[in-house]
Amino acid sequence: MHAKKLIIMGVLLALACIAFMTIGAKGSWSFLLVFRGTKLLALLLVSVAISVATLLFQTISGNRILTPSIMGFDSLYLLVQTLLVFTLGGFTYVALDGQLKFLAEVGVMLFAATLLFTTIMGKGKQDLHRMVLVGIIFGVLFRSLSGFLQRIIDPNDFAILQGASFAQFSSVDKELLGVSILLVSGCCIVIWRLRHTLDVIALGRNNAINLGVNYERTSFLVLVLVATLVSVSTALVGPVAFFGLLVTSLAHFIMNTHRHSILLPASVLIAAIILVTGQTAFERILKSQSTLSVTVEFFGGLLFLLLLFRGKMK
């Protein structure tokens, strides 16, 4: 049954990709294949990074309504962008080398996440909850600092900064895809080899330890992988808060299993179908009169509230 569902989702994704590449196609195919193919590859890459990172974070935290954004990654990304615009100016910010800026952003977010994990993890059985709380506090701090700096920068620079404050699925620098593919692929290979261990970790800390899993070391490794995936995704297209929650919730609902060998590919396929289909609709039908990220975040936020109130009512 699970295999049939995965096959159906794979077919739907293939149809969505064909529609994205062919609908409204005019002019030279040699140009269209490269232009649209680059955007399609970026959408698929972001789908993998966000869905896998969210699923793993929920497994480690033991909570299906949490996402990696709660650790303050989005706020840190926005603070980095704000500091760059504040110190360099809007025009210099726009002229920065894309690859250097991308690697710097990934490096800063990964360094901050690793510093947080190494400082908090291993301090006791409540270390994960403490880490989430510290992440929330730092997220508020980063947002406050960003808000303060945004109020004192030049209005023209603020307009440039606003463009980096929201996820942009339609404008991805193709020069960044090579590095992103290497990082995401490396993380996914390690994660796939840990899929059975993740099933055990999902049973809880004590059960995982009793079943022979080195919980502290594995949790740290998974959190570093999550930080890497989120850093790459955020630096590539911008902050996305609730999309991962929407995707993983649909994967759990459709597949109705706790096995990561099923949930991982299901989450990736669902994320890719949503992004590719949504981007096709907004670009070809609505003529980019709205933003896909805003729509996705809206429905993801509604789902978050629904799950939150549902949990309180039980």
Image (cartoon, rainbow, N blue to C red):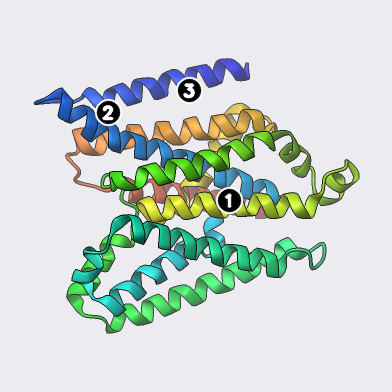
Q: Residue 211 in the image: x percent, y percent?
A: 88, 41
Tag 2 near tag 1, CB within 8 Å: no
In the rendered structure, which amino acid carries the disc numbered 1? Val
Classify 10 Å Cα crowding around label 3: few (below 14), some (14-19), many (20 and above): some
Name the residue rendered at 21%, 68% in the picture.
Answer: 159
Indicate the position of residue 298 as horizontal and vertical percent values.
40, 50
* Left or right: 286 as drawn, with respect to 190: left
Q: Label 1, label 3: how many angstroms apart (C-alpha)? A: 24 Å
Residue 245: x %, y % from top left: 53, 46
- Three-letter code for the amino acid on which mark 2 is drawn: Phe
Vertical arrangement, residue 248 with respect to residue 15, above or below: below
- Residue 53 in the image: x percent, y percent? 56, 46
Q: Which residue is mark 3?
A: 9
248, above or below 61, in the image: above
Q: Is 58 displayed left or right of 104 in the figure?
A: right
Q: Nearer the viewer, residue 53 or 89?
A: 89
Which residue type does callout 3 highlight? Answer: Met
| Label 2 crowd bin: few (<14), some (14–19), many (20+), radius 10 Å | many
Q: Nearer the viewer, mark 2 or mark 1?
A: 1
Residue highlighted by disc 1 = 226
Q: Secondary structure at mark 1?
A: helix
Q: Who is closer to the viewer here, 165 or 119?
A: 119
Gap between marks 2 and 3 measured at Cα: 16 Å
